[in-house]
Structure formats: C-alpha cells, structure tokens
Image (cartoon, rainbow, N blue to C red):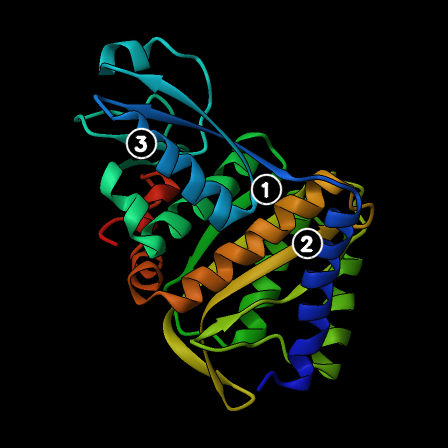
Amino acid sequence: MTEPKELGYLALYYQMEIEDEKRGNPQYHKVAIVGEVSKSIQNLIISRLNETFQGTTEADIFKSSESFKKSSERYLIVFSTLPLESKDVTTPIVRIQSIFKNDELVSKVTLSQVMAGISSQQVKFRIQRFEERISYLKAVENLIDTEISTGELLPGFKLDWKKREEKMSNVFQNGIAIPHMVDKSNHSRILLTVGILSKAVKYQGKEVRIIFLIGIPQNLNSKLSKILSHVYDLIFMISGYDEIYNNLLEYDMDLPLTQITEGI
C-alpha cells in the first residue's frame, strides 16, 4: 500500500500525465533498424514500441552499418543485427532480440529519453560521490550548496527543502531518496543531481544509499513536464532493477550514462 507521504509525489506524477493527454501530445519516437531485417520484424518492432510507450513510432531502415553511419539523425534507440558503433553516446544500440525482452526494452528507451533531455539541455545532470560517511540530511545540503555555488539554484531552495523535510519524508524504497522542490531560479530545465553514498545510512528508519535531488522549474511547460515524467520513470526503474541500481553505484564518471543499463 502507498504510504501517505508518497501520495504528494504520485499525485504530481499522474497529474502531469493527465494534463499532457488533455493537451493532445502523443509521444513520437524515431528509431533506426540496421541490418537485413524482414518487413514483419520491422512492423513488430514498431508495434511493440507503440504498444509499450503509447505513441507513434517511425523507423529508418539501413541495410548496412556504412549507410547508418551516414545518417545525421538522432534516434531514440537503434536495433541492429550487425556489430555497430554508436555515433551518439546518448543513443543505445540493442540487439533485435531485445524487442522480445520487455524489461530491457523499457529500461533502455527510458534512459535514452532522459539522455536526450540532457543532450538538449532540458535536463541539467550531475553525479556526486560521497567517499566519507555522511548523514542523509548533510548529503542533501551538500548537493544543494554545490548547485547554489554554480548558480543553478537560489539560496531559498535549501530553506524550502528543509521545511519540506520537516513535514514529510522524501525517502522511498530500496535505499533511494528523492528530495524534490520547485526551483525559482528561472532556469528553464529540470535539475537532476545524483548523490551516491559510500555506505547506506539510516534516516527515519529507512536506509538511504542514492539521492536524486530534483529541481522543478516554477514555469513547467509541456515539454519540460514530459521530460520530468521521464526522469521520474528512470528513477523508479533504477529502484526496481538490481542490475541498474548496482551499475549506478559503480558509476564511472568517464563513461556515458548508458553504462547503467549494461548487462541487463
């Protein structure tokens, strides 16, 4: 059963989805299919994507890796039967067989949607490791202070967050905390700062190991609303899949974000 303290987040999340539907903004996906792939499999891929993500999918078909490399298009995901190197580190390349593995498909498409937001600067993304043992509250303060020092947040954000923490917990299941507040800095983007603790710490009877600090623009337009829903989808995907969760704990700052879905 959902705890009362989580209802605020869930209400926000589903309200965004309802409002987006009312605005008549169906999701549009552009994907690539590389290799000798039959028309029936092409149609199956498009059908599965439309069914899973409730949108409209258009696919560009490439018979060879050489022809794919000539394309300047940015794809949500690339399905391939051939060994292929991505031209864009934000675009996952997966095997055709993944269309039959729903967990793999959903996780990689969700990650790709967030990475597209990062690439287009609609998401300001940063990861910070805490090597020394630190409390949950001190860790969040540190994350916020860093963003204030770089001009990403205003000082009032920290005060608003402290008041919120006094009223309700932002700690969810599986060692994940999601402190989220309205960002009044006038930046037109979603702020997503991830804090990874060296060891889990207790807060209000729950363990915390990963902190997702989210700054939500005061003026949330339809595009940012959709990106924000993708961010929350990614967070709950990380919470629900041990492989992705553990990959994030071992995150290598020198590698692209796609590393967190490797091996699934």
In the rendered structure, which disc, 3 or 2, sits on the residue that comes first in sequence?
A: 3
Say if mark 2 contacts mark 1, CB within 8 Å. Answer: yes
**Residue 115 at x, y = what percent?**
48, 39
Q: Is residue 98 above or below residue 205?
A: above
**Residue 258 at x, y = what percent?**
35, 42
In this view of the protein, can residue 151 be seen by the observer? no
Q: To which residue does mark 3 refer?
A: 40
Q: Is 104 on the left-hand or right-hand side of 212?
A: left
Question: Amino acid under label 2?
Answer: Gly
Q: To which residue does mark 2 refer?
A: 215
Q: To which residue does mark 1 refer?
A: 124
Q: Is 11 on the left-hand or right-hand side of 80?
A: right
Q: CA distance from mark 3 to mark 2?
A: 44 Å
The secondary structure type at the circle numbered 3 is helix
Residue 167 vs residue 79, the one in the foreground: 79
Residue 150 vs residue 84, the one in the foreground: 84
